[in-house]
Image (tube, rainbow, N blue to C red):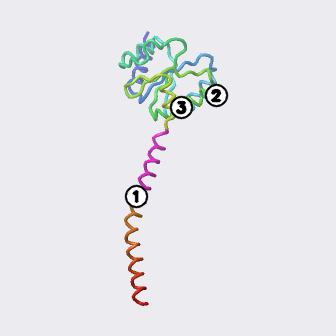
């Protein structure tokens, strides 16, 4: 009993402290495949396999209702502490190679996500890529502005040179 209470307390902390949570079904995956999945997402997330009853209690304790009615069969939670998009991409790629892993739903910023919405999340670009694109756009705008300001000056210089040339003739 004390062991279950400790597990529920730990899961409750994970539900409360995660940037995002994804519900998966792993029916048919081998222990080796689960270890591989854990390794692949370990930088940004924790993969927790627990009894559905304990997951339900922990989710309720944390005030997360996104998974109500979905905890059936061999369920495991992905508790994201890093970038949610990165983890969604890794899960998508792992599921392509191991079709027995099924992402059932998710929870991000207080909003429940369907399996399709989690797939769309995986299709987004990472924060680093988006920031790099924004920086590139800003840099291009600055160069364009510098050109616009320099063009009249260069044209004026050419005009003055042409006038001098004309006067000297």
The quarter of the picture where residue 1 lies is: top left
> In which quadrant will I find the C terminus?
bottom left
Residue 117 higher or lower than 124, as above or below: above
Q: For mark 3, what is the residue?
A: 41
Q: Using a 10 Å C-alpha cutoff, classify the residue at mark 1 as few (fewer than 14 neighbours), some (14 to 19) or many (20 or more).
A: few
The quarter of the picture where residue 64 lies is: top left
Q: Using a 10 Å C-alpha cutoff, classify the residue at mark 2 as few (fewer than 14 neighbours), some (14 to 19) or many (20 or more).
A: few
Q: Position of residue 137 (x, y in %)?
A: 44, 51
Q: For mark 2, what is the residue?
A: 97
| Tag 1 secondary structure | helix
Residue 141 higher or lower than 18, as above or below: below
- Which region shows up in magenta? 125-144
Give the distance between the C-alpha atoms of the residues marked 2 and 3, in whole angstroms. Answer: 15 Å
Give the distance between the C-alpha atoms of the residues marked 3 and 1, in whole angstroms. Answer: 39 Å
| Tag 2 secondary structure | helix
Residue drawn 57% across the image and 31% down it: 39
Give the distance between the C-alpha atoms of the residues marked 2 and 1, in whole angstroms. Answer: 44 Å
| Tag 3 secondary structure | helix
Residue 88 on the magenta span: no
Q: Position of residue 8 (x, y in %)?
A: 42, 16
Q: Earlier in the sequence, mark 3 or mark 1?
A: 3
Quick check: 53 left or right of 60?
A: right
Residue 160 higher or lower than 41, as above or below: below
**Nearer to us: label 2 or label 3:** 2
**Nearer to us: label 2 or label 1:** 1
Q: For mark 1, what is the residue?
A: 142
Q: Position of residue 26 (x, y in %)?
A: 57, 19
Residue drawn 48% across the image and 31% down it: 121
């Amino acid at each position: 009993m004390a062991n279950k209470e400790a597990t529920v307390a730990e899961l409750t902390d994970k539900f409360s402290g995660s940037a995002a949570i994804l519900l998966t079904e792993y029916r048919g995956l081998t222990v080796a495949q689960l270890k591989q999945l854990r390794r692949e997402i370990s930088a940004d997330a924790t993969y927790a396999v627990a009894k559905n009853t304990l997951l339900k209690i922990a989710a309720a304790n944390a005030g997360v209702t996104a998974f109500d009615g979905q905890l059936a069969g061999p369920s495991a939670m992905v508790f994201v502490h890093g970038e949610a998009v990165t983890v969604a991409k890794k899960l998508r790629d792992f599921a392509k190679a191991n079709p027995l892993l099924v992402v059932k739903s998710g929870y991000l910023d207080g909003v429940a996500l369907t399996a399709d919405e989690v797939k769309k999340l995986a299709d987004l670009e990472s924060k680093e890529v988006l920031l790099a694109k924004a920086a590139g756009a800003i840099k291009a705008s600055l160069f364009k502005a510098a050109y616009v300001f320099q063009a009249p000056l260069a044209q004026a210089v050419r005009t003055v040179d042409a006038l001098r040339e004309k006067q000297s003739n």
